[in-house]
Image (cartoon, rainbow, N blue to C red):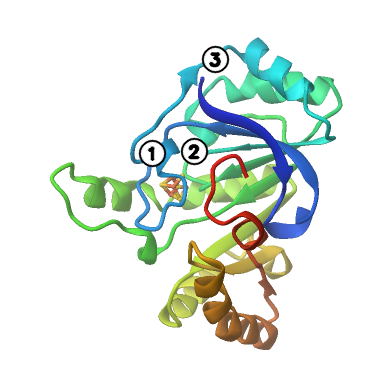
């Protein structure tokens, strides 16, 4: 599978925020979000093809109990099935971060799903990604299967107040998703942009019994690689 980085850091989002973890960043994605903060794993995928054994070996050198398989979109790589099985056999707690458009029968302790809403669509360009992105970004049958088979959390990126109505409509159409497992997080790549949006998103979450999700890795490290 193509991997652009393997590193130790601290989980900055969701219910495992603050947990020291090994991160495996798969490089490649079936979407192209306008706000993607890892373009080197989506728009212009970097990295090299590594064997499952090689990835396991590198993860095993990291001082942590949790491993996060992220991207890009890790679920485009069928090797994530044997990789997750091998890590599970070695006792790792496994989080998989996915946009929830593709299913694989992985070993996973926390399926961290970020469905992509209308605010993720990139501008039209000559590569045609806006249309491809919009055809692929919403896969309700995949989300239903993931939430039925795995412990999960669902994180939505919120940019404008209008996004909240779209998220509410999404949740109303997907009663399989428990509201208490839903996080709203601000869109932004700087601590200042996140702080500004956090004010109204946090208030909205309080009012509507949803969880606000800060993006601590950006506050702690900025939009840097290897974090
Ligand atoms: S799904 Fe994730 S990795 Fe892929 S383009 Fe969107 S934000 Fe980037």
Residue highlighted by disc 1: 30
Disc 3 packing (10 Å; few <14; some 14–19; many ≥20)? few
Q: Does the residue labelled 1 lie within 8 Å of ligand 1?
A: yes
Q: Distance between the residues labelled 3 and 1?
A: 20 Å
Would you identify the image quadrant in which residue 59 lies?
Answer: top right
Q: Does the residue labelled 2 lie within 8 Å of ligand 1?
A: yes
- The nearer-to-camera label among 2 and 3 is 3
Q: Is mark 2 on a helix, strand or loop?
A: loop
Contact check, label 2 and label 1, Cβ < 8 Å: yes
- Residue 218's x, y, as percent? 59, 59
Q: Nearer the viewer, residue 65 or 221?
A: 221
- The nearer-to-camera label among 3 and 1 is 3
- Residue 183's x, y, as percent? 64, 66
Q: What element carries label 3?
A: loop
Is residue 163 rendered to the left or right of residue 124? right
Q: Is residue 137 above or below residue 213?
A: above
Residue highlighted by disc 2: 73
Q: How far apart are marks 2 and 3 (CA)?
A: 16 Å
* Earlier-in-chain disc, 2 versus 3: 3
> In percent of the image, x 82 and y 20: which residue is there?
89
- Residue 4's x, y, as percent? 51, 29
Residue highlighted by disc 3: 50
Q: Distance between the residues labelled 2 and 1?
A: 7 Å
Q: Is mark 1 on a helix, strand or loop?
A: loop
> In percent of the image, x 78 and y 21: which residue is there?
60
> In percent of the image, x 65 and y 18: which residue is there?
82
Disc 2 packing (10 Å; few <14; some 14–19; many ≥20)? many
């Amino acid at each position: 599978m193509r991997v652009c980085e393997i590193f130790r850091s601290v989980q900055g989002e969701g219910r495992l925020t603050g947990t020291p973890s090994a991160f495996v960043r798969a490089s490649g994605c079936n979407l192209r979000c306008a706000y993607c903060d890892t373009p080197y794993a989506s728009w212009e995928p970097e990295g090299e093809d590594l064997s499952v054994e090689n990835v396991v070996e590198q993860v095993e050198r990291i001082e942590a109990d949790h491993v996060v398989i992220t991207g890009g979109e890790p679920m485009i790589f069928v090797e994530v099935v044997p990789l997750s099985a091998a890590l599970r056999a070695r006792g790792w707690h496994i989080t998989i971060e996915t946009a929830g458009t593709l299913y694989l029968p992985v070993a996973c302790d926390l399926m961290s799903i970020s469905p992509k809403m209308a605010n993720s669509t990139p501008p039209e360009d000559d590569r045609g990604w806006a249309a491809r992105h919009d055809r692929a970004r919403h896969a309700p049958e995949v989300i239903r299967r993931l939430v039925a088979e795995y412990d999960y959390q669902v994180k939505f990126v919120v940019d404008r107040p209008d996004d909240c109505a779209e998220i509410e409509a999404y949740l109303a159409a997907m009663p399989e998703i428990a509201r208490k497992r839903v996080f709203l997080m601000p869109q932004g790549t700087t601590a200042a942009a996140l702080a500004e949006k956090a004010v109204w998103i946090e208030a909205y979450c309080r009012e509507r019994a949803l969880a606000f999700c800060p993006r601590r890795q950006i506050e702690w490290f900025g939009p840097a690689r290897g974090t």
